[in-house]
Image (cartoon, rainbow, N blue to C red):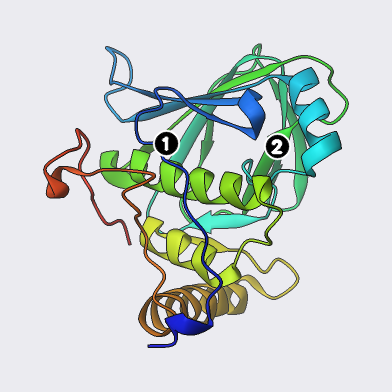
Amino acid sequence: MLSCLVHSFPRSETTAQHPLQTDGGARITEFLPPDHEHDEFRVRQTVLKKKLDKFKATQGDSAKSPPLCHWHLHKDEYFYVEKGSILLKIDGEDHIITAKDRVIEIKAGVYHSFDIDPNSNEDLVWVAYVEPEDGLTEKFFRNAFGYLDDCQNKRITPNLFQLLVFLYHDGTFVALPRLPKFLGKWLSRWVFGYFGGRVIGEKLLGFKDNYPEYFLSQDSGTGKNSDKKTE
């Protein structure tokens, strides 16, 4: 309805990238098949520290690790580090996680964020998976990372409502930790998520949760992955 007010730009074709490379090749995201230990869909991300620092020096900081505090409506999230160290914040507390640590479980509803350990000069490799199985999707990662990478390379500020659309369809919401949790969750889910993402972002501004330049689903007859909606 109001899509004419939205700044648009040509999207990069990244559907054929396996693995997906962003930040000038400094961030490599692999979408892994199930294995004998983890039946769920898994994603592995490698962050090349020196290459990322060099990219940031010319292109600015990246938003493709989730430093912004967030929470999941239904998903229990699990991740572990294979190399390097990661800074994990859970309900406001900082934790440094390395390959020596066990698998970390983050229950649905828990506020959290994570990023590469700022005090480490080592490359980072980490793997994540969630329950239920359809809660972590290649569609979300490819669309969100593809969009953010395009914005970064074109020096365009990401549109908040587009990001809210991606997050809403993933069942993920921005946390408001300074408010009482019951109030913060209600506002983040219904005001930011539903009203900001679904009503303003999707219905009024015309943003989508999936773009064929970034991800092709089975519904389109050309992709290999299901285009499931997780709310």
- The N terminus appears in which quarter of the rendering? bottom left
Residue 149 placement: quadrant: top right
Which residue in the structure is indicated by mark 2?
Answer: 115
Is residue 195 visible from the viewing direction of this image?
no
Q: Amino acid at mark 2?
A: Asp
Pick out the residue farthest to the bottom: 1
Count neighbours of disc 1 (C-alpha within 10 A) and say few if under 14, some if 14 to 19, many if 20 or more: some
* Label 1 with label 2: CB-CB less than 8 Å: no
Q: Amino acid at mark 1?
A: Thr
Q: Position of residue 48 (x, y in %)?
A: 69, 19
Which residue in the structure is indicated by mark 1?
Answer: 14
Count neighbours of disc 2 (C-alpha within 10 A) and say few if under 14, some if 14 to 19, many if 20 or more: some
Q: Is the residue 50 above or below the residue 115 in the image?
A: above
Q: Position of residue 36 (x, y in %)?
A: 27, 12
Q: Position of residue 2 (x, y in %)?
A: 44, 87
Residue at image location 32% in from the left, 30% down from the top: 41
Q: Position of residue 140 (x, y in %)?
A: 40, 47
Front position in the image: 175 or 159: 159
**Secondary structure beneath label 1:** loop
Q: Is the residue 193 above or below the residue 166 in the image?
A: below
- Indicate which disc residue 129 carries: none
> Mark 1 against mark 2, which lies toward the viewer?
1
Q: Marks 1 and 2, how far apart in space?
A: 24 Å
- Side of 165 where 48 appears, left or right: right
**Secondary structure beneath label 2:** strand
Residue at image location 33% in from the left, 43% down from the top: 215
